[in-house]
Image (cartoon, rainbow, N blue to C red):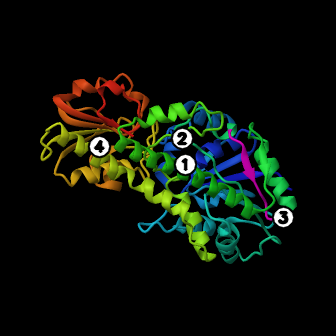
């Protein structure tokens, strides 16, 4: 193979950390359709906070890393990595639009002998049956003759500064055995946690989509347990801690399941199964359970208020946290919005406080206001929805009226001040 020059298409939570890592060993260009995103990165700051400013600046200044929205600047690359989002639409059907767009971009720049590797989460068959035909049509070249492909599923955990991309074992695959080995060599040269070369692209695609589906189902199980034990007057966390003393008990906790992976990937697997004439039961049952947890939290909070004799109409409610998980600014597919909407049906005054979330993005995507500074007022109820470290040490009681309710979604508050929790 010729000298490897890498282009990573899509500079979000997945693409940027990977591109930065590749730049330590290879000439690397990051490509994104958003010019403002590229300008901000070249100025040395990542708004997602996945790559620290000093690390990003080192990549730019000392390794020649470039971020661009100019397609002309990626035509001399020969190893293209696609890391764009794979969302679902309002009906929970997979939306491959970003992948089609990225594949079109690849088709416009790919040359004979080049390789394109997809990292976006998909169901088995998407790379070869959906993406590659687009590359062929746009480029006029033939797959596995003029250019080659691979699939290496992303395993980024947003906000996790310990399990960064180089410290997570990577699955790789290629469209031919030789290309698979080449792709594996490129990734293994920067991944310290080693790699696993899957026998086919479809196997690698399937491995990724079941990782998050498995986690989704396990969380759905403990969410159902939480509902059962709450009715029985038993603390779910106490039960899980007791059961966890058995060596092979899986330590899952109940909670909201949002974001762009666990809350989305099972729908990709489900649709794929349905095209083969199989209607998945457990996968979709888990999705229904987890998608209903926001409304459940809201209703439990209202019940607790009524039990305490707190006037619900026009009461003041504080929601702590809005991002889909702790310690990151990502608000995509956050399930806290479900809590908000369910509470709003009771005509409440709701304040959402999240020091991580960008208020402009939240208002644009969800049409609600989020504050980064806590207003000086007293609340009738508080829903602790996200366990940001910035909330540690927060005196929740000082924010509440004498008669109040606290519902702790993540079980991080002192149980002596909580009235309910999952």
> For mark 2, what is the residue?
252
Q: Residue 134 carries which label?
A: none
Q: Is mark 2 on a helix, strand or loop?
A: loop
Measure how far apart labels 2 and 4 are at the Cα level: 29 Å
Q: In the figure, 282 relative to 323: above or below?
A: below
Q: Which of pointers 1 and 4 indicates the residue nearer the eye? A: 1
Q: Give percent across and percent down for residue 106.
A: 66, 65
Q: What element carries label 1?
A: helix
The residue to which callout 3 is attached is 176
Residue 157 position by quadrant: top right
Q: Which residue bears the numbered disc 4?
A: 370
Q: Residues within 10 Å of mark 2 (few under 14, many from 20)?
A: some
In what quadrant of the picture does the N terminus appear? bottom right
- Measured in 3D between alpha carbons, the distance from the residue under mark 3 to the one under mark 2, in whole angstroms, is 38 Å
- Position of 281 relative to 43 (above/below): below
> Camera-side residue: 113 or 279?
279
1 vs 3, front mark: 1
Sequence-first disc among 2 and 1: 1
| Residue 337 can be seen in this image | no
Circles 2 and 1 in contact, beta carbons < 8 Å: yes
Q: Is mark 3 on a helix, strand or loop?
A: loop
How far, Cα to Cα, is label 3 from label 4?
Answer: 50 Å
- 22 is within the stretch colored magenta: no
Nearer to us: label 3 or label 2: 2
- Asked whether the beta carbons under mark 1 and mark 3 sit within 8 Å of each other, the answer is no
- Which class describes the residues within 10 Å of circle 3: few (<14), some (14-19), or many (20+)? some
Q: Distance between the residues labelled 1 and 3?
A: 35 Å
Given contact means CB atoms under 8 Å apart, are the residues at marks 2 and 4 in contact?
Answer: no
Q: Which residues fall within the magenta stretch?
A: 168-175
- Provide the residue designation for mark 1: 218
Label 1 neighbourhood size at 10 Å, few (<14), some (14-19), many (20+)?
some
Counting residues from the N terminus, which is met first, the one under dot 3 or under dot 4? Answer: 3
């Amino acid at each position: 193979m010729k000298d490897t020059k890498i282009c990573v298409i899509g500079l979000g939570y997945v693409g940027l950390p990977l591109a930065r890592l590749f730049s330590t060993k290879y000439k690397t260009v990051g490509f994104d359709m958003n010019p403002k995103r590229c300008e901000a990165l070249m100025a040395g700051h990542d708004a997602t906070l996945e790559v620290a400013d000093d690390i990003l600046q080192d990549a730019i200044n000392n390794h020649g890393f470039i971020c661009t929205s100019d397609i002309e600047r990626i035509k001399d690359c020969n190893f293209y990595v696609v890391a764009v989002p794979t969302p679902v639409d309002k009906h929970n059907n997979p939306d491959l639009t970003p992948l089609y767009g990225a594949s079109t971009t690849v088709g416009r720049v790919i040359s004979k002998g080049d390789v394109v590797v997809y990292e976006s989460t998909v169901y088995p068959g998407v790379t070869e049956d959906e993406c590659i035909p687009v590359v062929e049509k746009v480029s006029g070249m033939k797959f596995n003759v003029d250019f080659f492909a691979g699939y290496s599923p992303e395993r980024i955990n947003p906000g996790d500064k310990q399990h960064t991309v180089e410290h997570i074992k990577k699955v790789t695959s290629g469209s031919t055995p030789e290309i698979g080995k080449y792709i594996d060599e490129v990734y293994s040269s920067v991944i310290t946690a080693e790699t696993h070369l899957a026998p086919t692209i479809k196997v690698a695609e399937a491995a990724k989509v079941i990782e998050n589906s498995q986690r989704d189902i396990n969380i759905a199980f403990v969410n159902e347990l939480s509902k059962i034990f709450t009715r029985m007057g038993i603390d779910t966390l106490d039960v899980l801690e007791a059961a966890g003393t058995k060596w092979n008990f899986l330590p899952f906790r109940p909670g909201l399941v949002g974001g762009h992976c666990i809350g989305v990937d099972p729908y990709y697997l489900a649709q794929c199964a349905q095209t083969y004439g199989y209607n998945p039961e457990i996968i979709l049952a888990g999705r229904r359970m987890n998608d209903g947890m926001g409304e459940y939290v809201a209703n439990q909070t209202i019940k607790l208020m009524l039990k305490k004799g707190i006037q619900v109409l026009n009461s003041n409610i504080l929601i702590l946290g809005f991002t889909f998980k702790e310690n990151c600014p990502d608000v995509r597919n956050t399930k806290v919005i479900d809590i908000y909407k369910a509470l709003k049906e009771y005509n409440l005054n709701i304040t959402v406080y999240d020091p991580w979330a960008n208020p402009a993005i939240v208002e644009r995507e969800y049409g609600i206001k989020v504050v980064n500074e806590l207003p000086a007022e007293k609340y009738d109820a508080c829903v602790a929805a996200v366990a940001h470290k910035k909330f540690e040490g927060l005196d929740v009681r000082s924010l509440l009226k004498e008669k109040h309710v606290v519902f702790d979604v993540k079980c991080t508050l002192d149980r002596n001040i909580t009235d309910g929790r999952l």
